[in-house]
Amino acid sequence: VADVVIIGGAIMGSAVAYYLVGDCAFRGSVVVIERDPSYARASTALSAAGIRQQFSTPENVRLSRYGVRLLKDELKDRFGPDAEAGFREAGYLILASAAGRAVAEANNAVQRAEGADVALLDPGALAERFPWLSTDGLALGSLSLSGEGWFDAYGLMRVFRAAARAKGVDYVHAEAVGIERAGDRLVAVETTAGRIPAGVVVNAAGPQAGDVAAMAGIALPVEPRKRTVFTLACRDRPEGMPLLVDTSGVWARPEGEHVICGVSPPGADPRADGDFEPDHGLFEEIVWPALAARVPAFEAVKVVSAWAGHYEYNTLDQNAVLGPHPEVTNFLFANGFSGHGVQQAAGAGRAAAEWIAYGESRSLELSVFGYARIAQGRPVRELNVI
Ligand SMILES: Cc1cc2nc3c(=O)[nH]c(=O)nc-3n(C[C@H](O)[C@H](O)[C@H](O)COP(=O)(O)OP(=O)(O)OC[C@H]3O[C@@H](n4cnc5c(N)ncnc54)[C@H](O)[C@@H]3O)c2cc1C
């Protein structure tokens, strides 16, 4: 028996567990069910781990800004002097052509209203600041001056997990295979290690969140979609390179002595159950031509490796589904982040924990991400999906 059963124990499940016992001083019992404690195929382990404030929806800016605050200011206070999550505050530079100028300016206004430190640079200023960048076809670049970059997502997951376990959360190595429901209440989770009666059930199953919701007879439009990341060796790596998002949608950033990069596949983007084979064609056809045109030093790169992971893709609007189900109120979602989940895990985990402990999200107003919009088919329009 557990007061709270969390299905999925990677960054999202572990953040919910930590904030429950470490922040909300929840006194009930918490069990996390994780089918693969090696996390080899978890999105968290295969992520590019970028963190940005450059969204178009204020709530997305807020969620990620809390992640930045945790990484920059709160990590050691909360988790002790040895806690480390490798935050590199090197920024994001999102480029826009003339066609994208109006959207970039509107987004900038939203971001600045939320307190984000983001500047719009014209091509002259871009060329001066980033001499390695070709400004051909650019109208502007949106550059964060602080509070964006990348971090060690696996490391942050371990920090949450260790802190949750130290405060009594029980991680069970098992797969959830069914959810018992009586009317509008969930009653228990069936697992490969037995049945666990539950007061509250949290869906933190990442790309499998749709499958887990279906176990409770609830439709959730979240499914695994494959994303490939390429690791490049580059002799003249651009100096002071932020995470660059080209007008083509191709992104690239430094990683140690290498550069990593990728793009969302144009066209068909089917469910990817079990498919972790990197899509090398994407590099030849889209990523490399775009990068070589934008950063001439990248004409002479070599792919040294590649990996593929799964986005937990929300097919309605590529945004989080967060908080309790409106009718089945003891079922909570922390799902559907579609490629921005590691940076939002802290904010989302804290919000989910507050819903459980206090019946409301106290630190951030996040009702825009509630399940009600899914039921009504009413998407949240986020323009900066990378
Ligand atoms: C290539 C790539 C690049 C990305 N880049 C970024 C980025 O730059 N910035 C960013 O913020 N995000 C990024 N993301 C997205 C981010 O990785 C995810 O949003 C985040 O990791 C989701 O965390 P999660 O804990 O919900 O899911 P996961 O890490 O997938 O964890 C879900 C866990 O649930 C377990 N599970 C599933 N079903 C069951 C079951 N039935 N029973 C028990 N356990 C179960 C799984 O084993 C897994 O450990 C990227 C993702 C990919 C794939």
Image (cartoon, helix red, strand yellow):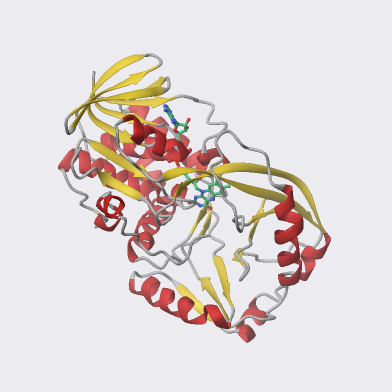
- Against 294, is 339 above or below? above
Name the spot of residue 153 as percent of width and height, x first: 51, 44
Tell me residue 133's x, y (percent): 70, 74
Q: Residue at x 34, y 69 (%)?
A: 114
Q: Is residue 149 visible?
A: yes
Q: Quadrant of residue 91?
A: bottom right
Residue in front for this viewpoint, 300 or 200? 200
| Image point (61%, 36%), residue name | 275
**Can see residue 238?**
no
Outermost residue toward the top in this view: 194
Q: In this orientation, which residue lies closer to the viewer: 55 or 283?
A: 283
From the viewer's perspective, tell me whether residue 372 is left or right of residue 115: left
Q: Is residue 106 above or below residue 94?
A: below
Residue 364, placed above or below residue 383: above
Quarter holding the N terminus?
Answer: top left
**Residue 115 rendering spot, x and y as whole percentages:** 36, 70
**Total number of numbered discs in the rendering:** 0
Report the residue at 33% width, 74% height from top.
113
Asked where in the image residue 241 lies, by quadrant, the reply is: bottom right
Residue 40 x, y percent position in the rendering: 57, 31
Q: Is residue 198 left or right of residue 298?
A: left
- In the drawing, does residue 305 fall left or right of residue 228? right
